[in-house]
Amino acid sequence: SRSTPSASSAGGAGSGSQRSWSPSSPRSRIRLDATERWESFRAPAPTLGPVEMRPPVDGWFLFFHRGCWQIGPAVGSREVYARCPVAAQLAPSILADWEVWDVGRKCFYKHKHLRAFKGGF
């Protein structure tokens, strides 16, 4: 892990825990990449019997704000995970050319495969 808990986080959730962050060096990036591996997973067995709907664990919202479509934790949020600057299209059928936030570099980058399609055709 790149972040290490400070001494104040040992007291639990109510003690105002903070974490310090140190930027990764090229050597630590190589070490992190070396621990990755490729594995194939089998498809899960089909569920037999009744199935129930549950609320999502993480909710994201697609909304139009300040001239571009954005994906974030709440409508109008300042925390934006991705943005698509297509101001000319207020109701597009396909959103491409997404810019996704890179947490490590702290900047947006063009994503090759992210698309959003309008439903209900």
Image (cartoon, rainbow, N blue to C red):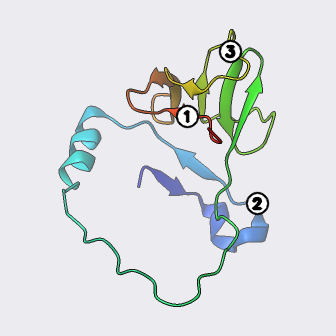
Work out whether 119 lies above or below 1. above
Residue that mark 2 sits on: 16
Q: Quadrant of the N terminus?
A: bottom left
Residue 62 on image: x %, y %:
69, 37
Question: How many numbered discs?
Answer: 3
Q: Which mark is residue 116?
A: 1
Give the amino acid type for the residue marked by disc 3 in the picture.
Answer: Gln
Tell me which numbered mark, 1 or 3, is placed earlier along the sequence.
Answer: 3
Of all residues, the one furthest to the front in this rendering is 121
Residue 14: mark in rendering: none
Looking at the rendered structure, the secondary structure element under dot 3 is: loop
Determine crowd level at label 2: few under 14, some 14-19, many 20+ residues with C-alpha closer than 10 A: few
Q: Quadrant of the C terminus?
A: top right
Confirm or deny contact between disc 3 and disc 2 (CB under 8 A). no
Q: CA distance from mark 1 to mark 3?
A: 13 Å
Left or right of 79 on screen, residue 112:
left
Does residue 27 sit above or below 64 in this rendering? below
Callout 1 amino acid: Ala
Mark 3, residue position: 89
Which residue is drawn at the image coordinates 39% and 80% (left, top)?
Answer: 46
Q: Which image quadrant for residue 55?
A: bottom right
- Separation of disc 3 and disc 2 at Cα? 44 Å
Q: Position of residue 70 (x, y in %)?
A: 67, 29
In front here: 7 or 13? 13
Of mark 2 and mark 1, the one earlier in the sequence is 2
Q: Describe the element under mark 1 as helix, strand or loop.
A: strand
- Name the spot of residue 18 as percent of width and height, x first: 66, 54
In the rendered image, the vertical position of residue 51 relative to residue 43, given as above or below:
below
Q: Are marks 1 and 3 in contact (CB under 8 Å)?
A: no
